[in-house]
Image (cartoon, rainbow, N blue to C red):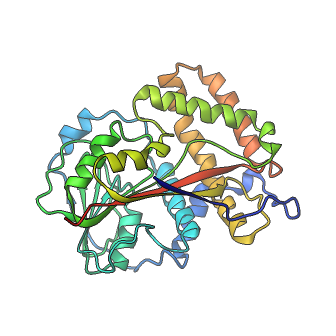
Amino acid sequence: MAGDIEDPYPVSDSDWASADEGSLDVTTLASSVLNYEYKVRPAQTKTPMISDTKDKRVQNGRRKVQPNDEAEQDRMDLLHHIYALILDGELHMAPIKSHPERVLDLGTGTGIWAIDFADQYKSAEVLGNDLSPIQPSWIPPNLQFEVDDYEADWVYSRPFDYIHGRELAGAVSNFDRLFQQAFEHLKPGGYLEMQSFRVEVYADDDSLDRAPYTTKMCSLLQEASAKFGKPMANMDEWADRMMKEGFDDVTCKIVKVPISPWPADKKQKEIGKFFQAQQMQGIQSYVPELLQSILKWGADEVEVLMAGARKELFDTTIHQYGKLYFVYGRKPRG
């Protein structure tokens, strides 16, 4: 397995960012990035193409703990912007061919990645797959959304050049099967790429000692998701599992990403600002459901934990960062 950790910023006390909780509104920030250079949208309306041939079956058969309300959709779009900043506007790390013909986006969510990909690769046929994909007001003509369960049997009749899965940690119960089905439905030479943040917090100094609520919250989320059967922190296993299913040239790249705007570097500080906002929403979206439903915590206990984690999130003397995993592999050509 190949694995690289990229450290894009130094730990420095020379330029701490300041922020207050009241200044961070996820909806406002999510709206503000729509005109960002990485995500320019045509101002036209088009009825999206939605296929729901297996809608009722999969909706009733798959357990979910992930929210899907408007606030969560804003958070997902904001997270897409964070990815764009990290990748300098690129949508993938895998060295896919310059003119992919057919592409599958697993767990497409709001569809924002699929929309950007289809807009960039206009000759490609792009398919966004999810249990409940959002219906945007405009999509490129080469994009189609389908309501389906990527954990069920795949029934595609034509293979793909590239299969993409972003932020699927905590949403997959059997990665071996997922990777196996992806392998079977790729063209020879095609790539599978998985992108996801690990639910854990890190620091390269002792400042994390001042974040007991955050570290405990991450540990509990890992415990709850594993107990639920859909782990949120098993990315270190993905490369080996992909190789087991037959993928070649499997690569794992890990990028350090600031969770708040504490770095001195301008770009990293901007990433930290947006990550801080989406983290605020993420805490409220995921923690109560997992801790109360799975670990049987009381609502008051959960609120105390979240309040402590939110306070630590705004302490920029805590140099906390997360790890973003990019894991991809190629189906052999023959």
In terms of image quadrants, where is residue 299?
top right
Image coordinates of residue 206 in percent, x first then y, are 82, 43
Count of marks, rendered view: 0
The residue at the point 45 percent across, 51 percent down is 167
Q: Quadrant of residue 136?
A: bottom left
Q: Position of residue 262 (x, y in %)?
A: 77, 58
- Residue 94 percent location from the top left of the image: 41, 67
Residue 24 vertical placement versus 315 (above, below): below
Q: Position of residue 209 (x, y in %)?
A: 80, 37
**Residue shown at 60%/62% (left/top)?**
28
- Above or below, 240 relative to 102: above
> Left or right: 256 with respect to 51?
right
**Residue 213 in view here:** yes
Q: Is residue 141 above or below residue 26?
A: below
Side of 213 relative to 250 (left or right): right
Q: What residue do we see at 45% from left, 25% from top?
A: 227
Would you say residue 44 is visible in this rendering?
Answer: no
- Which residue is at the far left? 157
Horizontal arrangement in the rendering, residue 59 relative to residue 314 (left or right): left
Residue sitting nearer the eye, 203 or 305 = 203
- Quadrant in which the C terminus appears: bottom left
Which of the pair 293/87 is nearer the observer?
87
